[in-house]
């Protein structure tokens, strides 16, 4: 008998005690605690003990893909998540519209935080080619976008043009390996950066912004180069169909990289004001067509990076309602995080995250609350991210016997 499953990953949900309690312990979350009470709990080191997971590598690991083998660089996932169909050998970057002065010194790395103007500015890049390389640029949200370089003999082993700071000159991309591919790609990126300055300075919208006394979005800064190669999908590995319900491009991208279909959900974004009802509806709907549905919630990480304890507790309480909705389906429901982001640190940490599996036949342990302390006593013990998917696959009835 084959079963279905929903995996909810709450970004950066894990935390450390603040005056004796973690945000998960402070939050009122009856549904999530019911999940723990009737499920099997544990702690998970997303990548490995002591390793601080980035969100992309953390998700890959949870989906069962060893990041040391499969991680391609953030640009790849951002580009896939933005809906660009990548081809083998493409090199992808995350980009920012920024404001520079005449000496290419950065005045604002986010060009005054653009709203929807990116789509208009993007038009300046239609059909751009540099030497024999196609440069595909797509704006995504606010000041953000993705760049894909497509052509023969490219490499992702090059440095960023984004200095990640203001009041300094933009950087020249340099090869990080001594070979002609890396040299060529860094040269192309430098030429693209100069061209972006020229094209954007000529853009009508920017001329208007200048007249209005607004900052011009007059250059594109690139970072996080990644080279795309197709990897074996979840379907090829396990034989079930999977889909992703997420707001953030990065998560859609990682999901796409492992072969999930991405479901577009109106009102779902990567912020705290994301429409969790819409996501719950979309996930339950998706179960009609798919066997495995991944639901991502980003808000817990955003408030953690802001050091907003109250915001984190509230976000967890909102997630509790999402869990309540999803519990109505007779499926395996798994809840965890991709890493801890302690509000006291405002950054990711290597602390393991709690995990619970709820559904038919699990060995219910005596953990009654879902948090970092209680789950450490659970029946799953301490697992690594890479071990979660095989366990889920087993409950779903897709595991193959080892031996005979
Ligand atoms: Zn994350
Ligand atoms: Zn984060």
Image (tube, rainbow, N blue to C red):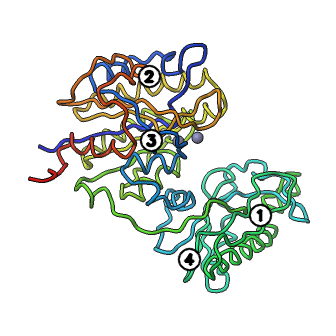
User: Relative to 283, does residue 237 appear above or below in the rendering?
Assistant: below
Which image quadrant: the N terminus? top left
Say the numbered circle drawn on residue 371. 2
For the residues labelled 2 and 1, the Cα–Cα distance comes to 45 Å
Earlier residue among tags 2 and 1: 1
Say the numbered circle drawn on residue 307. none
Q: In this image, 101 relative to 50: left or right?
A: right
Q: Which residue is mark 1?
A: 219
Badges 3 and 2: C-beta atoms under 8 Å apart?
no
Q: Which residue is mark 3?
A: 46
Q: In this image, 304 relative to 168: left or right?
A: left
Figure quadrant of residue 8: top left
For the residues labelled 3 and 2, the Cα–Cα distance comes to 16 Å
Between circles 4 and 1, the one closer to the viewer is 4
Q: Where does the image place residue 315, in percent across and percent down from the top left? A: 53, 26
Q: Residue at x 61, y 20 (%)?
A: 310
Say the numbered circle drawn on residue 150. 4
Q: Tell me if mark 3 has few (under 14), some (14-19) or many (20+) residues whose alpha carbon lies within 10 angstroms of its own.
A: many
Badges 3 and 1: C-beta atoms under 8 Å apart?
no
């Amino acid at each position: 008998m084959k079963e279905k499953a929903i995996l909810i990953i709450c970004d950066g949900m894990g935390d450390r005690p603040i005056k004796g309690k973690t945000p998960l312990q402070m939050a009122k979350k009856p549904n999530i605690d019911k999940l723990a009470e009737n499920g099997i709990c544990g702690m998970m080191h997303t990548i490995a003990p002591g390793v601080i997971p980035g969100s992309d590598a953390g998700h890959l690991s949870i989906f069962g893909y060893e990041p040391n083998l499969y991680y391609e660089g953030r640009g790849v996932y951002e580009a896939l998540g933005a809906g660009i169909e990548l081809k083998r050998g493409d090199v992808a970057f995350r980009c920012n519209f920024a404001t520079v002065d005449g000496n290419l010194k950065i005045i604002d790395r986010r060009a005054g935080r653009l709203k929807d103007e990116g789509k208009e500015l993007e038009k300046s890049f239609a059909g751009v080619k540099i030497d024999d390389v196609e440069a595909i640029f797509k704006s995504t949200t606010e000041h953000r976008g993705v760049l894909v370089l497509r052509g023969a003999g490219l490499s992702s082993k090059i440095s960023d043009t984004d200095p990640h700071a203001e009041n300094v000159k933009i950087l020249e991309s340099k090869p990080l390996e001594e070979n002609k591919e890396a040299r060529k790609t860094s040269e192309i990126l430098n030429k693209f950066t100069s061209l972006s300055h020229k094209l954007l300075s000529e853009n009508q919208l920017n001329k208007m912004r200048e007249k209005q006394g607004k900052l011009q979005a007059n250059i594109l800064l690139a970072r996080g180069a990644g080279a795309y190669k197709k990897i074996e999908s979840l379907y090829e590995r396990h034989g079930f169909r999977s889909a992703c319900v997420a707001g953030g491009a990065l998560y859609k991208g990682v999901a796409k990289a492992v072969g999930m279909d991405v479901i577009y959900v109106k009102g779902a974004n990567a912020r705290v004001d994301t429409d969790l009802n819409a996501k719950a509806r979309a996930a339950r709907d998706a179960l009609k067509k798919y066997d495995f549905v991944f639901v991502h919630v980003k808000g817990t990480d955003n408030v953690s990076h802001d050091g907003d304890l109250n915001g984190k507790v509230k976000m967890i309480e909102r997630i509790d309602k999402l869990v309540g909705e999803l519990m109505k389906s007779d499926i395996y429901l798994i809840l965890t995080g991709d890493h801890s982001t302690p509000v006291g640190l405002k950054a990711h940490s290597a602390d393991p995250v709690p995990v619970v599996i709820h559904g038919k036949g699990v060995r219910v342990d005596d953990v009654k609350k879902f948090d970092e302390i209680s789950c450490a006593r659970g029946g799953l013990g301490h697992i690594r991210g890479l071990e979660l998917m095989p366990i889920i696959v087993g409950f779903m009835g897709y595991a193959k016997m080892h031996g005979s």
